[in-house]
Image (cartoon, rainbow, N blue to C red):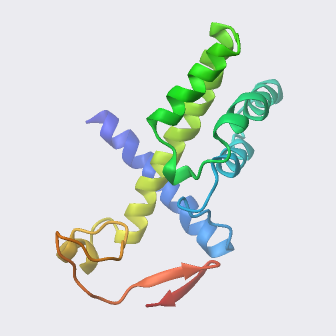
Amino acid sequence: MEGILKHMKEVTIAEAELRASLNKGDYFEPSKTLFKDYISEWLKNRRTLSPETLELFENNRRLYINPSLGHIPLSKLNAQHIEDFLTDMDEKGLGEWSIKRAFSILNAALNSAVTNTIAQAALESAWGAIVLTKQANNLFGIKGKGTAGSCTMPTTEYVNGKPVKC
C-alpha cells in the first residue's frame, strides 16, 4: 500500500506540472516529441543533481543516448530500441560501468516519462470522473473507430496551451 501511495503522490505532482505546462503553452506532446528533446528537458529539471553529476548525465546524453535514440519519437521508443542501444555500446567496446551508467540515466528518464503519461491520463480523465472515461473507458481521449466499437461526444483539445472545443 505504501508503494501505491508514493506513486499516487508522484502522479499528483506530475499532473500539477502538466497543468502548468499547458497554461504556459510549453507542453510536449509525447506522440510528436523526439526522445532527444524529451531527455534534454528532463535533464534541465534535475534541480537536485550536483553540477558534477549533471555534467556526467549531459555527457552520457550527448555521447551515447542521443546518437542512438534521440531521433525516435518518445511515444515510439520500445524495448528493442533499448536492447539495440545496449548492444551498440557493448560492440563499441565501452566498459561495463559506462554501459550501466548510460542505462541508469536512460531508465530514470523513461520512468519519469511513464509517470508523466499516467499524470496526463489522470488530468485528461479528471481522475476517471469524466463521462468519456466512465462510458467509453477512455483515459486519453483517443478518437477513432474500431472493431471494439466507439462512441461520439464533445471533447476539449489543447492547441498551443489554449483549450479548443471539439
Residue 39: image location, x then y, percent: 67, 44
Residue beneath the point at 47% across and 33% down: 80
Query: Which quadrant of the figure has residue 94?
Result: top right
Residue 121: image location, x then y, percent: 39, 62
Identity of the residue furthest to the front in this view:
91
Residue beneath the point at 33% across and 34% down: 3
User: In which quadrant of the rendered image does the N terminus lie?
Assistant: top left
* 14 sits left or right of 45 in the view: left
* 117 sits left or right of 23 in the view: left
Q: Is residue 19 above or below residue 88?
A: below
Residue 29: image location, x then y, percent: 57, 64
Which of the two residues, 152 or 26, is positioned nearer the viewer here? Answer: 152
Residue beneath the point at 36% across and 71% down: 142
Which of the two residues, 61 or 81, is positioned nearer the viewer here? Answer: 81
Q: Is residue 49 above or below residue 96?
A: below
Which of the two residues, 139 or 7, is positioned nearer the viewer here? Answer: 139
Residue 59: image location, x then y, percent: 80, 29
User: In which quadrant of the rendered image does the C terminus lie?
Assistant: bottom left
Which of the two residues, 64 or 84, is positioned nearer the viewer here? Answer: 84
Query: How many numbered markers are drawn?
Result: 0
